[in-house]
Amino acid sequence: MLLTIALAAMAVLDPPPKAKVELLSEMTTLVAGETNTLGLQFRIDKEWHLYYASQNDTGFPPTIESATLPEGFTLGPIQWPVPTRHVSNGDLLDHIYENEVTLLLPVRVPTDATGPATISLTLDWLVCKEVCLMGGQTVTLTLPVSKERTPAEVTKGVFARARQAMPRPASEAESRVGMKWDNGRLVLSARPPTAGAGDGDTRPPARVEFYPSADSVPIVDLLHAGVSETGEITLEVGDTAGSVRGMLAIFPKPKDQPIVFAVDRAVPVRGNSEPTRSSDQQPPSGR
Protein backbone atom coordinates (compact mmCIF):
# COMPACT_ATOMS: atom_id res chain seq x y z
CA MET A 1 0.00 0.00 0.00
CA LEU A 2 2.76 2.41 0.96
CA LEU A 3 4.70 1.47 -2.21
CA THR A 4 1.62 2.23 -4.37
CA ILE A 5 1.23 5.65 -2.75
CA ALA A 6 4.95 6.38 -3.21
CA LEU A 7 4.85 5.43 -6.90
CA ALA A 8 1.77 7.58 -7.45
CA ALA A 9 3.52 10.54 -5.80
CA MET A 10 6.59 10.05 -8.00
CA ALA A 11 4.37 10.03 -11.11
CA VAL A 12 2.89 13.38 -10.10
CA LEU A 13 6.27 14.91 -9.28
CA ASP A 14 7.97 13.57 -12.40
CA PRO A 15 5.39 13.35 -15.21
CA PRO A 16 6.41 11.87 -18.56
CA PRO A 17 7.47 14.44 -21.18
CA LYS A 18 4.66 15.76 -23.37
CA ALA A 19 7.06 16.87 -26.11
CA LYS A 20 10.31 15.45 -27.46
CA VAL A 21 12.82 16.91 -29.91
CA GLU A 22 15.30 15.48 -32.40
CA LEU A 23 18.13 17.30 -34.18
CA LEU A 24 18.13 16.52 -37.92
CA SER A 25 20.26 17.48 -40.91
CA GLU A 26 19.09 18.32 -44.41
CA MET A 27 22.31 16.96 -45.90
CA THR A 28 24.24 13.75 -45.30
CA THR A 29 27.28 15.90 -44.44
CA LEU A 30 28.03 19.39 -43.21
CA VAL A 31 29.18 21.34 -46.25
CA ALA A 32 32.35 23.36 -45.64
CA GLY A 33 32.18 27.04 -46.56
CA GLU A 34 28.38 27.15 -46.57
CA THR A 35 25.43 27.80 -44.29
CA ASN A 36 23.88 24.42 -43.59
CA THR A 37 20.31 23.90 -42.40
CA LEU A 38 19.51 21.73 -39.41
CA GLY A 39 16.06 21.03 -38.04
CA LEU A 40 14.70 20.79 -34.51
CA GLN A 41 11.80 18.40 -34.97
CA PHE A 42 9.35 18.43 -32.06
CA ARG A 43 6.74 15.75 -31.57
CA ILE A 44 4.01 16.92 -29.23
CA ASP A 45 1.41 14.79 -27.46
CA LYS A 46 -2.21 15.13 -28.56
CA GLU A 47 -4.01 18.18 -27.11
CA TRP A 48 -0.72 19.68 -25.84
CA HIS A 49 1.08 22.57 -27.50
CA LEU A 50 4.33 24.52 -27.73
CA TYR A 51 4.66 28.25 -28.36
CA TYR A 52 5.79 30.44 -31.25
CA ALA A 53 8.23 33.24 -30.36
CA SER A 54 5.45 35.81 -30.25
CA GLN A 55 3.50 38.16 -27.99
CA ASN A 56 1.83 35.39 -26.02
CA ASP A 57 -0.32 35.79 -22.91
CA THR A 58 0.58 32.52 -21.17
CA GLY A 59 3.66 30.81 -22.57
CA PHE A 60 7.15 31.14 -24.00
CA PRO A 61 8.80 29.38 -26.96
CA PRO A 62 11.52 26.74 -27.06
CA THR A 63 14.91 28.28 -26.41
CA ILE A 64 18.47 27.09 -26.92
CA GLU A 65 20.00 27.41 -23.47
CA SER A 66 23.47 26.30 -24.53
CA ALA A 67 25.22 25.19 -27.70
CA THR A 68 28.49 23.32 -28.22
CA LEU A 69 29.92 23.57 -31.76
CA PRO A 70 33.32 22.92 -33.33
CA GLU A 71 35.68 25.89 -33.50
CA GLY A 72 34.69 28.35 -36.21
CA PHE A 73 31.12 27.08 -36.58
CA THR A 74 28.40 29.71 -36.13
CA LEU A 75 24.81 29.09 -35.07
CA GLY A 76 22.17 31.38 -36.60
CA PRO A 77 18.75 32.35 -35.19
CA ILE A 78 15.86 29.89 -35.19
CA GLN A 79 13.55 30.18 -38.20
CA TRP A 80 9.94 29.87 -37.05
CA PRO A 81 7.12 28.34 -39.14
CA VAL A 82 3.58 29.67 -39.18
CA PRO A 83 1.74 29.10 -35.87
CA THR A 84 -1.96 28.87 -34.96
CA ARG A 85 -3.94 31.41 -32.94
CA HIS A 86 -5.18 29.90 -29.68
CA VAL A 87 -7.68 31.69 -27.43
CA SER A 88 -8.27 30.15 -23.99
CA ASN A 89 -10.54 30.99 -21.07
CA GLY A 90 -10.32 34.62 -20.02
CA ASP A 91 -9.58 35.80 -23.58
CA LEU A 92 -5.94 34.78 -23.31
CA LEU A 93 -4.25 34.76 -26.71
CA ASP A 94 -1.29 32.59 -27.63
CA HIS A 95 0.35 31.51 -30.87
CA ILE A 96 1.06 27.80 -30.77
CA TYR A 97 2.24 24.62 -32.45
CA GLU A 98 0.48 21.27 -32.07
CA ASN A 99 1.28 17.64 -32.94
CA GLU A 100 4.56 18.19 -34.80
CA VAL A 101 6.69 21.18 -35.74
CA THR A 102 10.16 21.59 -37.20
CA LEU A 103 12.17 24.72 -36.43
CA LEU A 104 14.92 25.41 -38.96
CA LEU A 105 18.37 26.30 -37.68
CA PRO A 106 21.16 27.70 -39.89
CA VAL A 107 24.73 26.68 -39.08
CA ARG A 108 27.65 28.34 -40.84
CA VAL A 109 30.56 25.95 -41.43
CA PRO A 110 33.99 27.47 -42.05
CA THR A 111 35.79 26.77 -45.31
CA ASP A 112 38.66 24.99 -43.61
CA ALA A 113 36.48 22.78 -41.41
CA THR A 114 37.26 19.08 -41.17
CA GLY A 115 35.15 16.27 -39.82
CA PRO A 116 33.59 14.57 -38.20
CA ALA A 117 31.87 17.50 -36.49
CA THR A 118 29.61 17.25 -33.44
CA ILE A 119 26.90 19.80 -32.62
CA SER A 120 25.19 19.61 -29.23
CA LEU A 121 22.26 21.79 -28.17
CA THR A 122 20.45 22.00 -24.83
CA LEU A 123 16.87 23.23 -25.15
CA ASP A 124 14.17 24.32 -22.72
CA TRP A 125 10.48 24.78 -23.46
CA LEU A 126 7.04 25.08 -21.95
CA VAL A 127 4.38 22.59 -23.06
CA CYS A 128 0.76 23.25 -22.11
CA LYS A 129 -2.74 21.82 -22.09
CA GLU A 130 -4.99 22.76 -19.15
CA VAL A 131 -1.74 22.91 -17.17
CA CYS A 132 1.81 23.73 -18.24
CA LEU A 133 4.96 21.69 -17.74
CA MET A 134 8.58 22.65 -18.19
CA GLY A 135 10.43 20.49 -20.67
CA GLY A 136 14.02 20.19 -21.76
CA GLN A 137 16.39 17.98 -23.67
CA THR A 138 19.94 17.87 -25.00
CA VAL A 139 20.25 16.80 -28.64
CA THR A 140 23.48 15.89 -30.41
CA LEU A 141 24.34 15.33 -34.05
CA THR A 142 27.65 14.14 -35.49
CA LEU A 143 28.28 14.38 -39.22
CA PRO A 144 31.24 14.27 -41.60
CA VAL A 145 32.36 17.50 -43.27
CA SER A 146 32.80 17.66 -47.03
CA LYS A 147 32.54 19.93 -50.06
CA GLU A 148 29.69 17.91 -51.56
CA ARG A 149 25.98 18.69 -51.11
CA THR A 150 24.13 15.38 -50.83
CA PRO A 151 20.51 15.60 -49.58
CA ALA A 152 19.59 13.10 -46.89
CA GLU A 153 16.73 11.01 -48.24
CA VAL A 154 15.52 10.05 -44.75
CA THR A 155 14.85 13.70 -43.80
CA LYS A 156 13.82 15.01 -47.22
CA GLY A 157 10.10 15.07 -46.40
CA VAL A 158 10.64 16.69 -43.00
CA PHE A 159 12.56 19.63 -44.46
CA ALA A 160 10.16 19.99 -47.40
CA ARG A 161 7.22 20.35 -44.99
CA ALA A 162 9.20 22.70 -42.78
CA ARG A 163 10.01 25.02 -45.68
CA GLN A 164 6.39 25.04 -46.85
CA ALA A 165 5.38 26.23 -43.38
CA MET A 166 7.81 29.16 -43.43
CA PRO A 167 6.51 32.63 -44.36
CA ARG A 168 7.36 33.93 -47.79
CA PRO A 169 9.84 36.83 -47.54
CA ALA A 170 8.50 40.38 -47.33
CA SER A 171 9.91 41.05 -50.82
CA GLU A 172 7.34 38.61 -52.25
CA ALA A 173 4.40 40.32 -50.55
CA GLU A 174 4.28 43.28 -52.94
CA SER A 175 1.55 41.87 -55.20
CA ARG A 176 -0.54 40.26 -52.44
CA VAL A 177 -0.34 42.55 -49.42
CA GLY A 178 -0.90 46.29 -49.18
CA MET A 179 0.90 47.94 -46.26
CA LYS A 180 0.40 51.56 -45.25
CA TRP A 181 0.54 53.68 -42.10
CA ASP A 182 -2.46 55.72 -41.01
CA ASN A 183 -2.08 57.84 -37.84
CA GLY A 184 -0.05 55.31 -35.88
CA ARG A 185 -1.87 52.29 -37.26
CA LEU A 186 -0.47 49.84 -39.79
CA VAL A 187 -3.11 48.73 -42.28
CA LEU A 188 -2.41 45.35 -43.89
CA SER A 189 -4.69 44.60 -46.86
CA ALA A 190 -4.78 41.14 -48.40
CA ARG A 191 -5.31 41.33 -52.13
CA PRO A 192 -6.75 38.53 -54.24
CA PRO A 193 -4.32 37.10 -56.78
CA THR A 194 -4.48 38.66 -60.20
CA ALA A 195 -5.99 36.61 -62.99
CA GLY A 196 -3.46 34.18 -64.38
CA ALA A 197 -1.19 34.43 -61.32
CA GLY A 198 -1.60 30.73 -60.66
CA ASP A 199 -3.70 30.77 -57.49
CA GLY A 200 -6.90 30.53 -59.52
CA ASP A 201 -9.37 32.38 -57.27
CA THR A 202 -9.65 36.18 -57.46
CA ARG A 203 -12.24 36.53 -54.69
CA PRO A 204 -11.31 38.27 -51.41
CA PRO A 205 -9.91 35.89 -48.79
CA ALA A 206 -12.13 34.32 -46.16
CA ARG A 207 -9.86 35.42 -43.31
CA VAL A 208 -6.56 37.09 -42.55
CA GLU A 209 -4.53 36.75 -39.34
CA PHE A 210 -1.42 38.50 -38.03
CA TYR A 211 1.11 36.77 -35.78
CA PRO A 212 3.64 39.23 -34.31
CA SER A 213 7.15 38.04 -33.59
CA ALA A 214 8.72 38.52 -30.16
CA ASP A 215 10.86 41.43 -31.41
CA SER A 216 7.90 43.36 -32.85
CA VAL A 217 6.64 46.53 -31.21
CA PRO A 218 3.62 45.69 -29.02
CA ILE A 219 0.26 45.53 -30.78
CA VAL A 220 -2.74 47.14 -29.05
CA ASP A 221 -5.61 44.68 -28.46
CA LEU A 222 -4.00 41.90 -30.47
CA LEU A 223 -6.81 39.51 -29.50
CA HIS A 224 -9.30 41.41 -31.69
CA ALA A 225 -6.97 43.30 -34.04
CA GLY A 226 -4.98 40.24 -35.10
CA VAL A 227 -7.78 38.57 -37.09
CA SER A 228 -10.25 39.82 -39.69
CA GLU A 229 -12.79 38.42 -42.12
CA THR A 230 -12.81 41.58 -44.25
CA GLY A 231 -9.41 41.00 -45.84
CA GLU A 232 -7.89 43.93 -43.95
CA ILE A 233 -6.17 44.14 -40.57
CA THR A 234 -5.44 47.38 -38.74
CA LEU A 235 -2.69 47.20 -36.12
CA GLU A 236 -2.36 50.01 -33.59
CA VAL A 237 1.08 50.32 -32.04
CA GLY A 238 0.81 53.49 -29.97
CA ASP A 239 3.71 55.89 -29.58
CA THR A 240 6.41 53.25 -29.88
CA ALA A 241 9.65 53.28 -31.85
CA GLY A 242 10.68 50.15 -33.67
CA SER A 243 9.11 47.89 -36.29
CA VAL A 244 6.02 45.77 -36.72
CA ARG A 245 7.39 42.30 -37.40
CA GLY A 246 5.70 38.97 -37.79
CA MET A 247 3.60 37.03 -40.30
CA LEU A 248 0.41 37.80 -42.19
CA ALA A 249 -1.58 34.66 -43.03
CA ILE A 250 -4.14 34.81 -45.84
CA PHE A 251 -6.80 32.08 -45.84
CA PRO A 252 -8.38 32.02 -49.35
CA LYS A 253 -11.23 29.81 -48.08
CA PRO A 254 -12.25 29.00 -44.48
CA LYS A 255 -10.56 25.58 -44.35
CA ASP A 256 -7.66 26.31 -46.72
CA GLN A 257 -4.04 26.27 -45.69
CA PRO A 258 -2.90 29.90 -45.42
CA ILE A 259 -0.57 31.76 -47.73
CA VAL A 260 1.87 33.41 -45.31
CA PHE A 261 4.09 36.45 -45.81
CA ALA A 262 6.73 37.97 -43.54
CA VAL A 263 5.97 41.50 -42.33
CA ASP A 264 8.70 43.96 -41.31
CA ARG A 265 7.56 47.57 -41.30
CA ALA A 266 9.28 50.39 -39.40
CA VAL A 267 7.05 52.65 -37.32
CA PRO A 268 7.26 56.17 -38.82
CA VAL A 269 8.19 59.09 -36.60
CA ARG A 270 5.04 60.85 -35.42
CA GLY A 271 4.31 63.90 -37.52
CA ASN A 272 5.99 62.36 -40.55
CA SER A 273 4.06 60.46 -43.17
CA GLU A 274 5.49 57.27 -44.56
CA PRO A 275 6.31 57.54 -48.26
CA THR A 276 3.58 55.92 -50.30
CA ARG A 277 4.81 53.09 -52.50
CA SER A 278 3.08 51.66 -55.51
CA SER A 279 2.50 48.44 -53.58
CA ASP A 280 0.51 50.40 -50.97
CA GLN A 281 -2.08 51.56 -53.48
CA GLN A 282 -5.27 49.53 -53.57
CA PRO A 283 -6.24 48.50 -57.10
CA PRO A 284 -9.54 49.87 -58.43
CA SER A 285 -12.44 47.61 -57.52
CA GLY A 286 -13.78 47.18 -61.02
CA ARG A 287 -16.64 45.21 -59.49
Image: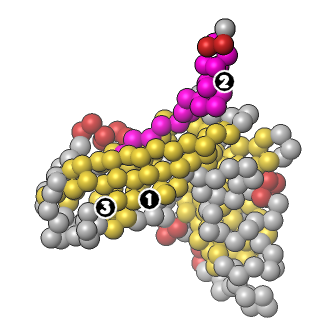
Distance Cα–Cα, label 2 vs label 1: 32 Å
Residue that mark 2 sits on: 9
Q: Which residue is mark 3?
A: 69
Q: Position of residue 164 (x, y in %)?
A: 44, 48
Q: Of the residues shown, which amino acid type is indicated by label 3?
A: Leu
- Residue at 68 percent of width and 40 percent of height: 132
Dot 1: within a 10 Å radius of its alpha carbon, few (fewer than 14), some, or many (20 or more) residues?
A: few
Q: Disc 3 to disc 2, how far (Cα)?
A: 39 Å
- Ranked by sequence position, the earlier of labels 2 and 1 is 2
Category of crowding for the residue at label 3, using alpha-carbon neighbours closer than 10 angstroms: few (below 14), some (14–19), many (at least 20) = some
Q: Position of residue 249 (x, y in %)?
A: 61, 53
Would residue 35 be found to the left or right of residue 64 on screen? left
x and y, in percent, of residue 31 in the image: 20, 60
Reply above or below: 252 against 110: above
Residue range in magenta is 4-23
Q: Which residue is mark 1?
A: 66
